[in-house]
Amino acid sequence: MARNKYDVDEQLETPFDFTHLKRSYVYIKKYKGKMIISLLISMAAAVFALVGPLITQRALDVSVPNKDIKELMMLGLALLGSTVLAAVLGNIRGRIMTIVGQNIIFDIREDLFAHLQELPFTYYDERPHGKILIRVINYVNSVSDMLSNGIINFIMEILNMIFILVFMLIVSPRLTIVAVSGLPIFVLVMFAIKKQQRRAWQDVSNKSSNMNAYLQENIVGARITQVFNREEENAEIYDTLNGKYRKAWMRAVKFSNLVWPATDNISTLIRASLFVVGLLVLPRETVSLGVLAAMTGYAGRFWQPIMNISNIMNNFINNIAYLERIFETLDEPVTITDKEGAGELGEITGKVSFDDVTFGYEKDINVLEHVSFDVKAGESIALVGPTGAGKSTIVSLISRFYDVEQGSIKVDGVPVSDVTLSSLRSQMGIMLQDSFIFSGTIKDNIRYGKLDATDEEVRQAAKTVCADEFIRGMEKGYLTEVNERGSKLSGGEKQLICFARTLLSDPKILVLDEATSSIDAKTEALLQKGLDRLLEGRTSFIIAHRLSTIRNCDRIMYIDEKGILESGTHDELMEKRGAYYELYTSQSA
């Protein structure tokens, strides 16, 4: 649970290698046709761009000495044409790769979102939501250019080096040796800073994730911050996190900025060496002014792709940490899933049985131990007891939001682990303690429980839970737009809308987890009449701290000490004068 904090850096489990890039081929291969076309266009653009120094050599060594104005004009037009063609082809290539990059972003985000929908509750219990969000938004943006333009540019710059090398060999093989003599120094520089650079950018990733997690937490809890006058303290915490991010960023940039100056200095030294060797060492008859001009032009261009490759490698090193984070999320196991051979659960009557069930959220810390009970179809079961005793855990296990460590849970005699999740959960209606409202209309929020429901069905569900009156009293009625989490609604209004959502799904098993905790006594009395009609013929599990609301349940189970401490009707438990009696009388006092 230690990683469920905004100020804890997440440690990567895998060492740095290019396996992640190989794995990303699954996203690249769909667009390899466009990428190949882009590469061919880039090659053509590179060839046109490299004609320039040869034209310059011809002009200096032949046209100018011969005073051939016509040839000079033709060479000038050829130089202009090659430059324009290279620019046009580069623009076409850029447009193609923009489309490819956006498509890769779309595919990765789609896979991430789909996977996040299937991950178990434990995944979200252990991580701040801000750290999850930054992977889907920021990290995907960062790696998309690397997977599209980055790979094409890497290949293209290597081809550029080869093309330039060929052109240099055509002009002067001996000066070509001088031009490439700085490569061993460049390789040594890259190896010297690569490891430190990767660690620095991983640290930036961690600090960015921490800052984002704290920011998201404070946006959600803005009201609580102001209620408790915590603005200054929170600002200090954010200032600390922001400072750590800035420090990590500056350290990472320091390593990144070593690459370009080193490459530029080597390039400048090589071009100077060409003049020294060409003018002072080699015979003058073999090195003309045109040859020197062409070779220095090609030498500058030869080191340009090297600088570009170093920048691309720089980008790879920077973004590989983000790619690791993305694959780390995609590799997170979906522990609650349909097992091989799982069958469809047919229409159920609502019988539920627990047989020697043991479960804990953390290893070796059990919440429930050896719990067994049977519920008949149509029975209403109340779960009461102290906070943290396991009441919500029991109903979560029925829906298979978690898997039991020992024992089995059956619905209509069929183990819940042997059927598909969709066929199980589609027959259950669950009203959670947290009344979550999605952004959209009130009608859409209620219809979330049954997407094909008619407007009349939506209204009838709202009427049953006494929500129709306040909804129709709003400016646009059922078409009123509500914000995320229902910030413009009262706690009771949110619960009633969620109640209507649950009832609309017409469940065979109904779970009400503190469903009336935010509803006033008058509304609760009206709601109870609708509930009595709804609960008839359905199996229901009701978790409530206000014991007056569950007196009429068929059975009350007092949950404590990792199991069922007492079980019976209200009258039976009152006669026992045990834990339930003490709880009830304490509330009545």
Image (cartoon, rainbow, N blue to C red):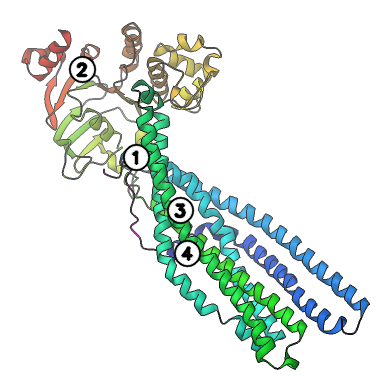
Label 3 belongs to which residue?
250
Q: How far apart are the alpha carbons under marks 2 and 1?
A: 35 Å
Q: Tell me which amino acid carries mark 4.
A: Lys
Q: Tell me which amino acid carries mark 3.
A: Met
Label 1 belongs to which residue?
124
The segment highlighted magenta reads 1-14
**Nearest to N terminus: mark 2 or mark 1:** 1
Q: Does 269 appear above or below 332?
A: below
**Nearest to N terminus: mark 4 or mark 3:** 4
- Residue 430 at x, y percent in the picture: 34, 27
Q: How busy is the neighbourhood of tag 4: few (under 14 within 10 Å), some, or many (20 plus)?
A: few
- Of circles 2 and 3, which is in front? 3
Which of the labelled discs sits on residue 22, or is there none?
A: 4
Image quarter in which the N terminus is found:
top left
Q: Does 528 appear above or below 168?
A: above
Q: How far apart are the alpha carbons under marks 2 and 4?
A: 60 Å
**Nearest to N terminus: mark 4 or mark 1:** 4
